[in-house]
Image (cartoon, rainbow, N blue to C red):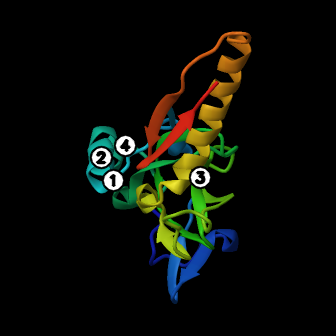
Amino acid sequence: MYLNENEKEVDYKHKVYVNNTKTITVPCPASLHTANDVQRCPRNELEWNAHAARLNCSSINQTCVNPSIFEYHCVLNKEGNGLLEVCAPSTHIFEQKCTEFNSLGKLIQASVINCSDALVTCPNAYRSTEMYKYQACYDVVYQSTRNEEAHCSSRSTEGKSHLGIAVGLSRRWDVYIW
């Protein structure tokens, strides 16, 4: 039995209204089998569509929602320290929050991570399948990964001098000197 926007019998915790339009966040156990850690998420619509075509979420056998809304996502993990690709029911995200996949709840939801201070901020409401437009959400993970790598490198190279390296991510260049 599929749940869709027209059904009324849905747990109240999962109902959300956007401009008087109901959006349903549906937990889906089938999503767990599609979740994979990734190093990088798509940076634009073209890359997003290519990744979505590769995963082909609508062809996955699941009974949570209509296959047309069981969609590709590349989002933060629940801890906000990694990225993952997952097929899950799409939803709306509010209050300039990033999007995450909660593996315990088996659903896409708003993260505690806010993207209101970024160069390109998240709007007050957006579809979970449009997170690629808000690269600041991914930058949180990229930055923490770079900091961990720099910390490890500085411990392994104590007493040695090195020239800096330039790393380009998300149309921004950071220079690290250690």
Q: Return the residue at label 1.
A: 44
Label 3 secondary element = strand
User: Given contact means CB atoms under 8 Å apart, are the residues at marks 2 and 1 in contact?
Assistant: yes
The numbered mark at residue 47 is 2
Q: Return the residue at label 3.
A: 100
What's the CA distance linking mark 1 and mark 3?
A: 18 Å
In terms of sequence position, does the residue under pointer 2 or pointer 4 come before the other? 2
User: Given contact means CB atoms under 8 Å apart, are the residues at marks 1 and 3 in contact?
Assistant: no
Measuring 64% from the left and 43% from the top, which residue is drawn there? 103
> At label 2, which amino acid type do we have?
Glu
Give residue 175's position: percent from left, percent from top.
53, 36
User: Given contact means CB atoms under 8 Å apart, are the residues at marks 4 and 3 in contact?
Assistant: no
Q: Return the residue at label 4.
A: 60
User: Given contact means CB atoms under 8 Å apart, are the residues at marks 1 and 4 in contact?
Assistant: no
Locate residue 11 relative to residue 45 in the image: left or right: right
| In-front residue for pair 169/98 | 169
Quarter of the image with the C terminus in it: top right
Give residue 82's position: percent from left, percent from top.
60, 38
Say which of marks 1 and 3 sits in front: 1
**Label tally:** 4
> At label 1, which amino acid type do we have?
Asn
